[in-house]
Amino acid sequence: MKRFEKQVVLITGGATGIGLATAKRFAEEGAKVVIASRNESVGQQAVAAIEQSGGVAVFIKTDVCKEAQVEALIKKTVDRFGKIDAAFNNSGTEGTMSPLADDDEQNYQHIFDVNVKGLWLCMKHQLRHMQKNGAGAIVNNASVAGLVGFPGLGLYTASKHAVLGLTKSAALENSTLGIRVNAVSPALIETDMAERILATHSEAREQTIAAFKSIHPIGRFGKPEEIAAAVTWLCSDDASFVLGQSLTVDGGMTAM
């Protein structure tokens, strides 16, 4: 039997990158997958790709910064499939790279609205559903930027530290209710976000890539599928004693 047979998994930011790779992994392992994103066309493409491989998936257009839409996402998922067994809160943004002294309020608001407020809203309504059922697993996508500092990404770094704080608090609040809350903290992964970060150094792209790779002792960037493997493990019964943790998947970056 597949690990997630008869289970329902909700993934925000599930249309591309790490979210899509994770959606595909859950579907391959038997789960019915709900993909939430603001981009309907890309979301429907993600659903089609999963269905073509024999999986079950639906798309629900959602802006995680708006509570009414998050609440509707949970209701639509439960109306469709009857429950939510696991959730991967993956929606996030890096905002605009800038030294803190040059940053502005608009960048702050955008980053914290998506990465902190959006994550809190998703957990709030996921937890309310899971508390009624007495079971569930939630994984939040943090970052190695939640563990160390990064120059030029101060606001993003602060937001990811907040993600880990929310994760630990939610884990403790629900520790006796059959609900496990954890986080995954990736380093640089081959995604659109990584491409945007690299694009800020387009005048010296090859040197920039080499420099970024050099801070990963493994000598390369991570792949979305490697993060998907970590997320599915955290949501599985194999991680039944793991609670309030950040699983760092970083090619050795934070070991230095």
Image: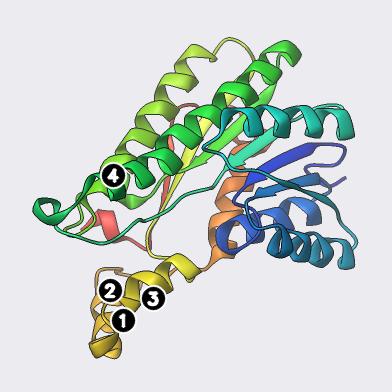
Numbered label attached to residue 118: none
The answer to whether the residue labelled 2 contacts the one labelled 4, judged by CB atoms less than 8 Å apart, is no
Q: Is residue 48 visible?
A: yes
Circles 1 and 2: CB distance less than 8 Å?
A: yes
Cα distance in 3D space between marks 1 and 2: 5 Å
Q: Which residue is mark 4?
A: 108
Specify which label sits upstream in the sequence, 2 or 3: 2
| Amino acid type, callout 3 | Arg
Dot 3, crowdedness within 10 Å: few (<14), some or many (≥20)?
some
The reply to whether the C-beta atoms of the residues labelled 2 and 3 are less than 8 Å apart is no
> Residue visible at 65% across and 34% down?
69
Dot 1: within a 10 Å radius of its alpha carbon, few (fewer than 14), some, or many (20 or more) residues?
some
Label 1 sits on a secondary structure element that is helix
CB under 8 Å between discs 3 and 4: no
Q: How is the image coloured?
A: rainbow
Q: Quadrant of the C terminus?
A: bottom left
Residue to which mark 3 is pinned: 220
* Residue 113 image position (x, y, % from top left): 41, 39
Q: Quadrant of the N terminus?
A: top right
- Secondary structure, mark 3, is loop
Report whether 42 appears left or right of 199: right
Residue 106 position in % (x across, y down) = 29, 47
Amino acid type at circle 1 is Ile
Choose the circle earlier in sequence order: 1 or 4: 4
Q: Position of residue 79 (x, y in %)?
A: 86, 28
| Residue under numbered circle 2 | 212
Instruction: Tell which tag, 2 or 3, sits nearer the viewer.
Output: 2
* First of labels 3, 1 by sequence position: 1
Out of 190 and 67, give the one closest to the viewer: 67
Determine the CA span between mark 1 and mark 4: 27 Å
Q: Amino acid at mark 4?
A: Tyr
